[in-house]
């Protein structure tokens, strides 16, 4: 690109390199031209080069690391699930609420496998499914934790004489908690898909020589609603667990006091 030098004749000019993103394929031109969308200027600014299309995949180190972690955690979950199934009728498994435990382990397994969707080239179907499936499956997992915590809390409350909580403790309550919490998340995801669903998109400006293929979430509001609800379930589980943290200690203390009372009565009757 040529520019006129101030204070000299009009026939005298200096040559300057084209600014970033522009090229000049000819000599002695007055202005540089911009590269078309999807291309970038070469180092010499004399030609346009097509940008490389990239996305998170199994080929790059980060994608490979994430895939290995997801498969490793899935294998660990399968081993735990197999152990529980092998000892299905043992007292420990029965006391651990078998139905909720199986639901929790299966949902955790699906959570780890859902992350593999993020390593597939973004397309119409993948962009619709990957956030939705993970959100629903993760909500089921957290709902199982919440249900187990509530059941334990109610079980200790039901041991009090004359407590009306006993009729609430049971399999139906646990299933109802998991089902209701999961359906709320499914409803939020349905509204998201019906109004502003995610779609594949290209980021042309973040990298100079590359085009990033990604999924546009469609609506940031709905996306954060889904995340917020998962956070609400996690916070609820933590709150219930925090409130019930002293119950086992209190139960053991009561049993110890009753044992001492019985021992005192028997000892007193023996020596009277």
Image: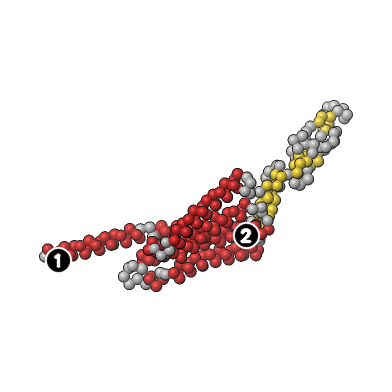
Q: 175 and 72: which one is in front?
A: 72
Residue 185 in picture, x, y percent from top left = 55, 63
Report the colour scheme. Answer: secondary structure
Q: Residue at x 51, y 60 (%)?
A: 106
Image position, residue 109 (x, y; %): 52, 57
Left or right of residue 42, residue 114 in this image: left
Classify 10 Å Cα crowding around label 1: few (below 14), some (14-19), many (20 and above). few
Total numbered circles: 2
Q: Kindly indicate the quadrant of the structure image that contains residue 226.
A: bottom right
**Residue at position x 56%, y 61% from top?**
136
Residue under the point 69% across and 53% down:
201
Q: For the residues marked 1 and 2, what is the alpha-carbon distance in whole angstroms?
A: 72 Å
- Dividing the image into 4 quarters, which one contains the N terminus? top right
What is the secondary structure assignment of the residue under circle 1?
Answer: helix
Q: Which residue is mark 1?
A: 269
Lateral position of residue 257 relative to residue 196, left or right: left
Which numbered disc covers residue 187? none
Counting other residues with Cα less than 10 Å from the Cα at mark 2, is it few (<14), some (14-19), or many (20 or more)?
A: some
> Where residue 173 sits: x, y (%)?
45, 69
Q: Is residue 8 above or below residue 217?
A: above
In this figure, which residue is indicated by the disc labeled 2?
129
Is 75 or 145 nearer to us in this picture? 75
Say if mark 1 contacts mark 2, CB within 8 Å.
no
Q: Is residue 221 visible?
A: no
Where does the image place residue 88, in percent across and percent down from the top left? 43, 63
Q: Image point 34% across, 59% down: which residue?
A: 248
Dot 2 lies on which element?
helix
Report the quarter where the C terminus lies: bottom left
**In the image as oriented, which residue stretches furthest toward the top?**
8
Q: Taking 69 as reference, is 12 above or below it?
A: above
């Amino acid at each position: 690109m040529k520019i006129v030098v101030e204070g000299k004749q009009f026939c005298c000019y200096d040559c300057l390199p084209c600014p970033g993103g522009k090229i000049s394929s000819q000599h002695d031109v007055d202005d540089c031209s911009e590269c078309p969308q999807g291309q970038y200027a070469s180092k010499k600014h004399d030609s346009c080069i097509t940008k490389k299309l990239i996305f998170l995949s199994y080929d790059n180190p980060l994608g490979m690391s994430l895939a290995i972690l997801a498969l490793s955690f899935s294998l660990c979950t399968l081993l735990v699930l197999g152990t529980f199934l092998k000892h299905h009728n043992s007292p420990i498994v029965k006391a651990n609420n078998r139905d909720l435990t199986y639901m929790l382990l299966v949902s955790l397994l699906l959570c780890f496998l859902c992350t593999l969707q993020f390593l597939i080239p973004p397309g119409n179907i993948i962009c619709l499914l990957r956030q939705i499936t993970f959100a629903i499956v993760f909500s089921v997992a957290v709902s199982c934790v919440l249900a187990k915590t509530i059941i334990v809390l109610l079980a200790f409350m039901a041991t009090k004489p004359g407590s009306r909580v006993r009729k609430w403790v049971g399999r139906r309550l646990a299933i109802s908690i998991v089902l209701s919490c999961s359906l709320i998340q499914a409803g939020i995801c349905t509204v998201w898909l019906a109004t502003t669903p995610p779609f594949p998109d290209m980021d042309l400006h973040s990298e100079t020589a590359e085009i990033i293929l990604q999924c546009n979430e469609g609506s940031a509001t709905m996306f954060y609603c889904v995340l917020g609800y998962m956070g609400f379930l996690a916070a609820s589980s933590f709150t219930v667990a925090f409130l019930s943290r002293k119950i086992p200690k209190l139960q053991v203390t009561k049993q110890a006091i009753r044992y001492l009372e019985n021992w005192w009565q028997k000892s007193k009757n023996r020596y009277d």
